[in-house]
């Protein structure tokens, strides 16, 4: 229980009964009077009803008689205040729809991205396989070319074509005095 100043504790204890407690005597009368003066509906305070009295005085020419309200005596010790208006909230359906659209578009985007990545992985694998085959072909061709350029292979191929090695070279003297070595005919 919260400790309050003495006069405040007594006032709150006298004005309203405890929850679930019995009301007897003077407390019951005060409680019923309070309920009549300040009607409520659940947790909402209701506007007090006013008695409508019809004006019996003669209205001015051409005007109908109007009902008037009788002023109500308000208790001076009442601590009631006007409740603030209910907070205005935006409708939930558009927000929920927007969130759903964003989530679904994100899921579809991720699905498309994963599909493209898998598709590119297959293409990359095929290209790597093709590159490995081309590398083997290139290596085989380089080996064949090196084999055919070797002196032993050239000599045997020349012999097959009927060529013979030259024994003595021939020299040519040019008018400017330079000598060129030329192979001579074989014997």
Image (cartoon, grey):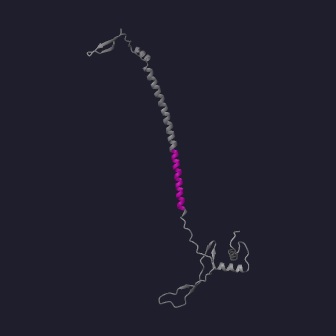
Residue at the limit of the structure toward the left, as seen here:
175
- Observer-nearest of 15 and 65: 15
- Observer-nearest of 21 and 75: 75
The range drawn in magenta is: 93-115
* Residue 69 percent coordinates (x, y): 56, 84
Query: Quadrant of residue 92 in the image?
Result: bottom right
Q: Residue at x 31, y 12 (%)?
A: 171
Q: Residue at x 50, y 42 (%)?
A: 119
* Residue 182 percent coordinates (x, y): 33, 14
Assign the C terminus to one quadrant of the image.
top left
Query: Quadrant of residue 28 in the image?
Result: bottom right
Residue at the limit of the structure toward the bottom, as seen here:
58
- Observer-nearest of 128 and 6: 6
* Left or right position of 59 against 15: left
In the depicted structure, whether residue 155 falls above or below residue 69:
above
Q: Residue at x 53, y 53 (%)?
A: 104
* Left or right position of 28 against 54: right
């Amino acid at each position: 229980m919260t400790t309050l100043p003495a006069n405040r504790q007594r006032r709150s204890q006298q004005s309203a009964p405890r929850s679930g407690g019995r009301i007897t005597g003077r407390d019951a009368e005060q409680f019923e009077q309070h309920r009549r003066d300040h009607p409520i509906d659940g947790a909402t305070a209701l506007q007090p009803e006013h008695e409508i009295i019809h004006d019996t005085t003669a209205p001015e020419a051409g005007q109908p008689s109007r009902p008037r309200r009788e002023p109500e005596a308000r208790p001076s010790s009442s601590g009631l205040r006007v409740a603030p208006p209910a907070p205005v909230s935006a409708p939930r359906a558009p927000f929920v729809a927007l969130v759903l659209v964003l989530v679904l578009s994100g899921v579809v985007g991720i699905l498309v991205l994963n599909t493209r990545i898998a598709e590119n992985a297959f293409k990359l694998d095929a290209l790597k396989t093709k590159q490995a085959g081309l590398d083997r072909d290139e290596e085989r061709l380089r080996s064949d070319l090196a084999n055919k350029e070797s002196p032993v292979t050239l000599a045997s191929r020349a012999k097959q074509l009927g060529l013979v090695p030259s024994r003595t070279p021939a020299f040519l003297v040019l008018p400017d005095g330079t000598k060129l070595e030329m192979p001579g005919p074989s014997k």
